[in-house]
Amino acid sequence: AKAGGRAGYRLHHPLHQPLDARARIQLDHAMRLALASKRFRLTYQPQHDLDSGRLVGVEALIRWHDPGRGGDIPPAEFIPVAEASGFIVAIGEWVLTQAVGQASRWLQQGWPLPVAVNVSALQFQQPYFVDQVQAVLEAASLPPHLLELELTESLLLHDAEETLSRLQALAQLGVRLAVDDFGTGYSSLAYLKRFPINKLKIDRGFVRGLPGDESDAAIVRAIVQMAQALELRVIAEGVETEAQREFLSRVGCPEGQGYLWAPALEAEVLEQHQRSQPLPPAPTPA
Ligand code: C2E
Ligand code: MG
Ligand code: MG
Ligand code: MG
């Protein structure tokens, strides 16, 4: 390969072996085929109330199993390639439609479960994005408050005026807005007061070291307090241990998501997971 590349598409993180241009093109082609031949699946990771254990929502996460490419291809591998090529727009539309359809079926079964969907910057920036969200909700007859859009900090920092009006339009629709991976972007916290954000998702990088790591503990406490002061909801990502759950609950974080409860599950498996939910813990004697 020619050294350096032409357009600076090489991402140079020494620890990550960047896919070379040919591998990216091949992966992009395989994704187009996968979408057309219905090889993507959408799975749902439960979100729980930290104290009662009650299921309070789910996050839709895409899965791609391709025996020809050695099995499961993780989103961290193909989503960045799709973002670079623009194909993320088509993938994102598929995810939105699937997730809203599933939420609507659950609602029809008497189960009003909020579903969160990850939205990439490029998808959000499409001029028709807000209209599309509205059309997808209407087609499925899903009340907008049962859809949450997960946005990243970097997306929120891009082109502030356009972003603001688009977020306001979404909030006007009644869709919920969450900041994903909170604390990992280059955040000017100013956007929290300007934008109609409903929720912060504490990145699992800050949850990992709980409860022992003092910096993580301090950061998580600060995020929870800030969320409370700004009347934002807050959820911790990547909760894996009972000790983490206990710490989070103690500092006032109401909700969590992570392997402690379950990974992302097929819809039918999630329904079983819900049925097998433990009853809320008995109140402790005073
Ligand atoms: P994310 O939105 O922050 O999603 C959370 C990720 O953490 C998921 O990885 C989930 O499986 C993983 N996770 C959940 N609980 C735990 C835990 O307790 N421990 C650990 N170690 N990990 C946990 P996943 O599904 O591999 O997705 C990775 C990223 O790919 C997502 O991060 C999101 O940025 C992106 N992604 C996934 N699905 C979609 C999608 O449909 N659209 C878009 N635009 N991006 C997606
Ligand atoms: Mg997410
Ligand atoms: Mg996240
Ligand atoms: Mg993440």
Image (cartoon, rainbow, N blue to C red):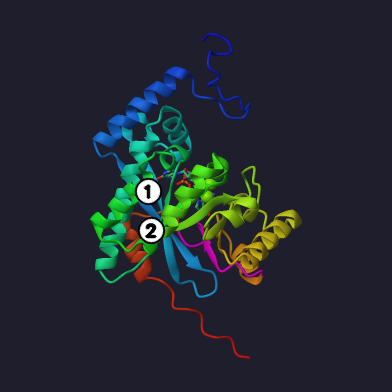
Q: Quadrant of the C terminus?
A: bottom right
Residue at position x 50%, y 45% in the image: 163
Quarter occupied by residue 262:
bottom left
Pointers 2 and 1 in contact (C-beta within 8 Å): yes
Q: What element carries label 2?
A: helix
Q: Is residue 175 visible?
A: no
Q: In this view, does 21 lie above or below 198?
A: above
Residue to which mark 2 is pinned: 173
Q: What element carries label 1?
A: helix
| The disc label shown at residue 130, or none | 1
The amino acid sitting under disc 1 is Val
Q: Give the range drawn in magenta.
A: 251-262
Residue 258 magenta: yes
Q: Position of residue 252 (x, y in %)?
A: 63, 70
Q: How many labels does the image show?
A: 2
Dot 1, crowdedness within 10 Å: few (<14), some or many (≥20)? some
The amino acid sitting under disc 2 is Leu
Quarter occupied by residue 71:
top left
User: Is the residue at mark 2 in contact range of ligand 1, meaning its CB lies under 8 Å from it?
Assistant: no
Q: Position of residue 14 (x, y in %)?
A: 63, 26
Mark with earlier residue (2, 1): 1
User: Is the residue at mark 1 in contact range of ligand 1, meaning its CB lies under 8 Å from it?
Assistant: no
Extreme residue in the right direction: 214
Q: Where is residue 207 in the image (x, y as percent from the top left)?
A: 62, 56
Q: Position of residue 18 (x, y in %)?
A: 53, 25
Dot 2, crowdedness within 10 Å: few (<14), some or many (≥20)? some
Q: In this view, does 27 lie above or below 94?
A: above
